[in-house]
Image (cartoon, helix red, strand yellow):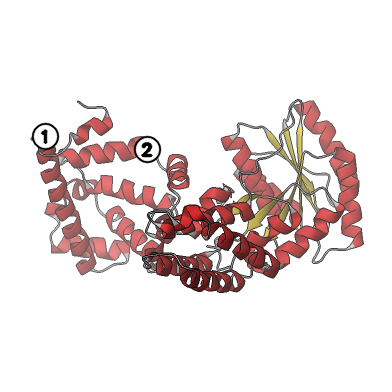
Amino acid sequence: MAFDSLSNRLNKALRDLSGKGRLTEKNMEDMLKEVRIALLEADVNYKIVKDFLVRVKEKSLGTDVLEAVDPSSMVVKIVHDEIVELLGTQEATLNYAEDGMTVIMMVGLQGTGKTTSIAKVANLVKKKHNRNPLLVAADIIRPAAIEQLQTLGKSIDVEVFTKGIETPATETVKQAMLYAKEKGYDTVFIDTAGRLHIDEELMNELKEIENLVHPNDILLTVDAMTGQDIVQVAKSFHEQLNVTGLVVTKFDGDSRGGGVLSVRSITQVPVKFVGQGEKIDDLELFYPDRMADRILGMGDIVTLVEQAQEKMDLEESERAAKRMMEGTFTMEDMLSQLEQVSKMGPIGGILKMLPGMNQYADMINDADAEKGLKKQKAIIQSMTLEEREDPSILNNRRKNRIAKGSGSTPQEVSKMVSQFEKMQKMMKQMGALSKGGKLPNLGGMFGKK
């Protein structure tokens, strides 16, 4: 994820400070030097780094901090608050029209994921905000852009309006607005043409569309992997269009994140969404305070819970947990839980959202972890229903058949069965202790008294 290297360096600098008994000018200078290196290596704008450090130092050497019981914790809070200030003090939401139809333009350079992003945002507002969106294919420059948008629209069950590549983009938009009003759509997303670089022709077309529809939002897609170029692109677009927010793509990649930290301070354009993967659901609202928590290794439990509620079948998870406590948990239940875990995304990403676990996330090879989950699922799926209900009937002949069916070895099948039996035994013991009053009544979690 963006900010990974920054997060590691900042955490090291702050951990070193916490080992000191008192806060002094000397150890503050040492810590600020490390923070400075971390920010510059993350490709944060030099002027922003300079101003950031001045503010942190002034606040950290104040009387309240120096006289605090744990001054290092106060410094962590100051650094956290200043990162939030850089990112934006509160989340920037879409500017929905108070009455009538909301119009959102998506602009950006080619290769930034503009067309995919507009479909992701439309999918998000449809699911989370209960909107009725229409996608408008106004990119007639890039080959196959219309077909791509139609494919994406079909995948999220959202209609795509197009007049083909022969009709000028402004005429397509004009007719789309009439169509949306006639059909009762409340949110119109306009996918505009991009270029390999900013040019006069591109800007003139975008200005024409802006003047035609007077959009409530103009969202600019920027690639997290391009570093400080994010700032230059945002400045150039914002000088000629009323850009109201950024959609940062490839946020899950190995970018340094400095552009994202710099862009709001320089352009005053807030980040509204971040793309965390290639799937249509891999888009998050951008919460500055939560991102600051993640950068400083404090986790992000709120987002983790929200993702669990969206992606997991919570009723099924409760049923499985209840069966665990009752000692009736089977391989079929285990398969269901493995599928639930897969929906949550990479294990490393989940660890980063847990307080104090950020340092262990890099130890996890997500590709290996995903491969392991797939193998476990394949082993269970290669079993008959009878074998899933009672793995004790698995003899060597059955294990050989399962191994062949799942692309594994008989030893791997045996190992997984052994792990399952140990877990089942432990859960039975916990259930018995709970019923005997030696543990809290775990059944109460699921509505039982």
Q: Name the secondary structure under disc 2.
A: helix
Q: Residues within 10 Å of mark 2 (few under 14, many from 20)?
A: few
| Percent x, y of residue 321 | 25, 40
Decide if residue 367 is in sight here: no
Q: Is residue 353 left or right of residue 315?
A: right
Q: Position of residue 301 (x, y in %)?
A: 42, 47
Amino acid type for the residue under numbered disc 1:
Lys
Q: How many marks?
A: 2
Q: Is residue 266 above or below residue 152?
A: below
Up-down relation of residue 153 to residue 253 (above or below) = above
Residue 272 image offset from top left, x and y in percent: 65, 48
**Which corner quadrant holds the C terminus?**
top left
Q: Is residue 421 left or right of residue 86?
A: left
User: What residue is rendered at 69% in x and 36% in y?
Assistant: 133
Q: Amino acid at mark 2?
A: Leu
Check disc 1 and report the residue beneath it.
435
Relative depth, front residue between 26 and 185: 26
> Residue 149: in sight, yes or no?
yes
Identity of the residue drawn at 90% across and 42% down? 211
Q: Are marks 2 and 1 in contact (CB under 8 Å)?
A: no
Q: Nearer the viewer, residue 403 or 321?
A: 321
Residue furthest to the left in view is 436
- Looking at the image, tell me whether mark 2 or mark 1 is earlier in sequence order: 2
| Inter-mark Cα distance, 2 to 1 | 24 Å
Q: Which labelled disc corresponds to residue 133? A: none
Q: Nearer the viewer, residue 420 or 95?
A: 95
Image: 27 above or below 127: below
Q: Residue at x 14, y 64 (%)?
A: 396
Quarter where residue 249 is shown:
bottom right
User: Which mark is nearer the camera, 2 or 1?
Assistant: 1
Residue that badge 2 annotates: 314
Residue 156 locus on image (x, y percent): 61, 42
